[in-house]
Amino acid sequence: ALTAGIVGLPNVGKSTLFNAITNSQVEAANYPFATIDPNVGVVEVPDHRLDDLAKLFNPKKVIHTTFEFTDIAGLVKGASRGEGLGNKFLANIRETDAICEVVRCFRDKDITHVDGSVDPVRDVETINLELVMADLETVDKRIEKLERKAKSGEKDAQEEMAVLTPIKETLEAGKSARVLEFDKDEMVYVNQYNLLSIKPIIYVANMGEEDIENPEDNPYYLQLKEYATNEGADVIPICAKIESELAGLDEEDRAIFMEDLGIEESGLDKLIRETYHLLNLKTFFTVGPDECRAWTFTDGMTAPQMAGKIHTDFERGFIRAETYSYDDMMTYKSENALREAGKIRQEGKTYVGKDGDVMFFKFNV
Ligand code: GDP
């Protein structure tokens, strides 16, 4: 399963946020595959399209798609030099597909900051530098292996050195590898290094309760936003404390509390949606009187591979897919009307799925 790692300095609110995540965790009955690792929280991805389809089909069950958050506690300065449990944390980050970096923006003098003051940009640079240093070690090791071969004229080694050199320069300048762009051939090499500072990142500005209605009034949030914008990254303002309270409530009380707070969507739901995008995931739907369900697939997947998301037998025995788009269903309101309008397509093995497709798979068992 795809996973986003929650990282941040000590005392910035990671555990509080992770509690909110585990409190709002999916019911295991609907997701038998869901892990029981205490450091992992499986979340449902809110998607109004699934809700809209459910209104038309009125199914017994509505099942959202999911992904995982992993709590990677304890990243500190010096991690890349193996200080503390540094190496273990870096290894944990290496296993994630994206990074959610929690940054302290709340003012509360009773809660100590490890570096003495609230300063989101300094904090982000502290953590990002650890990732950069770890990557530099990875890249240097690889260069050491290749250098002689490249000098003696080996083509492959030369080609790879041409990919490694700008990465090394970027890292040495203290910048994350994600600022670089690579073409398809270069990516074949880059993927092998499994760099940390190249992983997609989203910043979570952990704000005080007083800031939640107007995040822009908090200067720390603005500083973080400016930094992130320069990197091309997003910032989600959240109050972890409120989120953990919200997550513990039933639906009705939640709605009342959110209205009191003057918010329409919980910060956690926003974070889940944005992280889903960050993971570069797409969604298709299966619909019917029993169940309407959202499924995750990745860009470029073909119809049989999408069928394989449901069951490996569906992929193996794939014959064809009947499909229409969510948008068309919203226009025509029923499958009969879609059929009459010629909006239901028959697609074969080479069909590449699109976000928002509704699919019926025909297969041999
Ligand atoms: P971690 O070390 O990053 O996991 O941080 P914790 O989640 O344990 O939070 C550290 C302290 O900050 C705890 O005492 C939390 O109650 C407090 N805290 C977390 N979020 C907020 C917040 O939004 N506002 C305030 N005032 N305190 C918070």
Image (cartoon, helix red, strand yellow):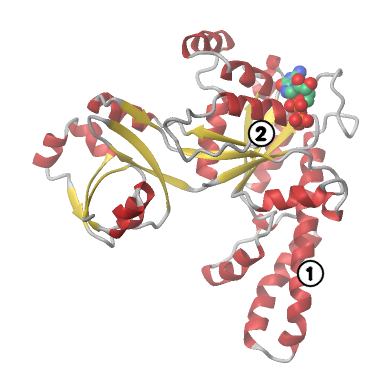
Instruction: Tell me if residue 12 can be seen.
Output: no
Instruction: Tell me if residue 200 can be seen.
Output: yes
The alpha-carbon separation of the residues under discs 2 and 1 comes to 31 Å
Q: Toward the viewer: 324 or 218?
A: 324
| 201 versus 244 height, above or below | below
* Mark drawn on residue 65: none
Is residue 109 left or right of 171 when viewed as pictured? right
Is residue 354 left or right of 127 when viewed as pictured? left
As shown in the figure, which amino acid type bears the numbered disc 2?
Val
**Residue 257 % position (x, y):** 55, 10
| Tag 2 residue | 204
Using the rendered view, name the quadrant where residue 6 is placed.
top right
| 337 versus 215 height, above or below | below
Dot 2 beta carbon under 8 Å from ligand 1: no
* Mark drawn on residue 140: 1
Q: Toward the viewer: 247 or 281?
A: 247
Q: Residue at x 44, y 35 (%)?
A: 31
**Residue 195 % position (x, y):** 68, 59
> Is disc 2 surrounded by few (<14), some (14 to 19) or many (20+) residues within 10 Å?
many
Q: Toward the viewer: 237 or 253?
A: 253
Using the rendered view, name the quadrant where residue 206 is placed.
top right
